[in-house]
Image (cartoon, rainbow, N blue to C red):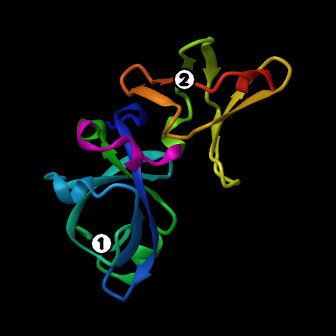
Amino acid sequence: MILKSSIFPIGQINKTHGVNGEMSFSFSSDIFDREDVPYFVLEIDGILVPFFLEEYRFKGSTTGLLKLDGITTEEQARAFYGLTIYLPKKFLENVEDTEIELDYFAGFKLVDAEKGELGIISEVDQTTENVLFVIPTKDDELLIPAGEEYIEKIDHDKKIIYVRLPEGLLDL
């Protein structure tokens, strides 16, 4: 059984392509091309299921076409529309932090070098130009910029992001 805690997201299936079960997908990491990744994990009706890759090819730097083993028709492929593509965390050590989809960080603890523990990230707000980590508080919520320049270290095993925030940011 595959656990959600043992995988991380790298992309999404966008739409079908042709009539033979091929699908268009977007990705934030091409780790599947750099490493020997035999399968993607997809969540089907709440169950994490491995699907072996029959073939794939790139269309651009963040898009491609893929064919999953056993998916042979457009109708079968249509059922995968919008699904997130996951990989086992054993591949995470070979992925740059900038290649990881930001929603992956929901549930991580945020720790500032000066102020200490700030809380648990409940969501990653990507609706504005500046991506924000959202941390609920007793009275409201903290909105912390998710810029690379503030992140000092990410501990994926312990689910902790260590940051050094600009002086005064938390006083706003």
Image: magenta residue range: 93-102
Q: Percent position (x, y) of residue 38?
A: 17, 55
Q: Position of residue 52 (x, y in %)?
A: 22, 59
The three-letter amino acid code for the residue at tag 1 is Leu
Residue at x 25% of width, y 53% of height:
31
Position of 145 with respect to 73 (left or right) is right
Foreground: disc 1 or disc 2: 2
Q: Is residue 118 left or right of residue 40?
A: right
Q: Picture coordinates of residue 105 (x, y %)? A: 51, 36
In terms of image quadrants, where is residue 155? top left
* Type of amino acid at the residue the image marks with label 2: Arg
- Main SS, magenta residues: helix
Residue extending furthest bottom? Answer: 19
- The residue drawn where x is 61% and y is 29% is 121
Name the residue at 39% across, 75% down. Answer: 24
Instruction: From the image, tell me which residue sits under label 1.
Output: 66
98 vs 165: above or below: below
